[in-house]
Image (spheres, rainbow, N blue to C red):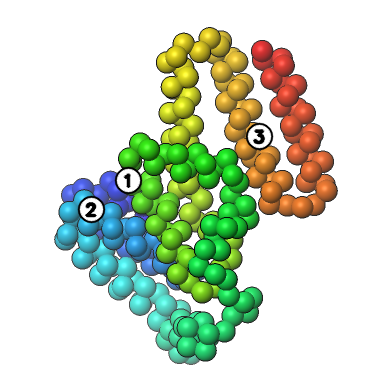
Amino acid sequence: MWLIILKARKGFNPIWLGGFALAIGVSIRYSELIFEVPAVLFLLLEKRIWHYFFFLLSFAVFFIFINGLSDKLYWGEPFYSLKNLFEFTFVHKLSSRGFEPFYFYVTHFGFWLNFLFISLALYSAKYKLKYPFLWGVVPLATLNLFPHKEPRYVIPVIPFFAMMAALSFWSLWMYFHKREYKATLPLQITIIETFLSTLLIVFIIQSHKDPKIFFCAFICFSHIVFNCSQGS
């Protein structure tokens, strides 16, 4: 959906398709509605007013059709799931797992990302590239408005944080490269692979507390260190 809207400068067919893609995502998991906000802001910032209206219209039409029809066929009542979700969460203020404060995703970032990734992602703000920041941070901020919060709801946002982190990493890498960093090409490749592999291992360790995971991570890290020594 993001790529469709991003590239659809002319014509309305891609905009309809973007609304359809978002409607499917929200129908599968209602929390995906968070991407409605950056999509709308993106179109407004690009001054694509007609695209803005057509996107909202297509999303509404497809969402109503998908949820109305599927719930009618399964539950015997249109919008049965959405109505019960709204009543359970917002009217009766109930939750199967309790409620969390609005800053939960910020103070518990270790449950869905690690400190290094977050630091690199936030560092990318200095390059004033508003769109990766828009699609990464705005949905996360929108998630904080929902009373019930779980780390799994943040999973769709992680790719955009990864893009921002990659931008920072690449910029820093080019900065040191321009300063005539004397390293051979094989060693440069080894360093990049080591960095990325270490990030992955740290993320796995943070996400799982099973001793077997620690052991596997230790074996992987030992293999990486060995390859580094061979590459250098």
Please, is residue 198 above or below residue 132 in the view? above
Quadrant, the C terminus = top right
Residue 65 sits in which quadrant? bottom left
Residue nearest the observer in this picture, 143 or 230: 143
Please, is residue 203 above or below residue 13 in the view? above
Residue 54 sits in which quadrant? bottom left
In the image, what residue occupies the spot 34% across and 71% down? 62
Label located before the other in sequence (1 or 2): 2
Crowding around mark 3 (Cα neighbors within 10 Å: few <14, some 14 to 19, many 20+) is some
* Visible residue check, residue 113: yes
The x and y percentages for residue 37 are: 34, 62
Do labels 1 and 2 touch, CB within 8 Å?
A: yes
The amino acid pointed to by label 1 is: Lys
Residues at marks 3 and 2, CA–CA distance in whole angstroms? 38 Å
Q: Which residue is mark 2?
A: 45
Q: Which residue is mark 1?
A: 130
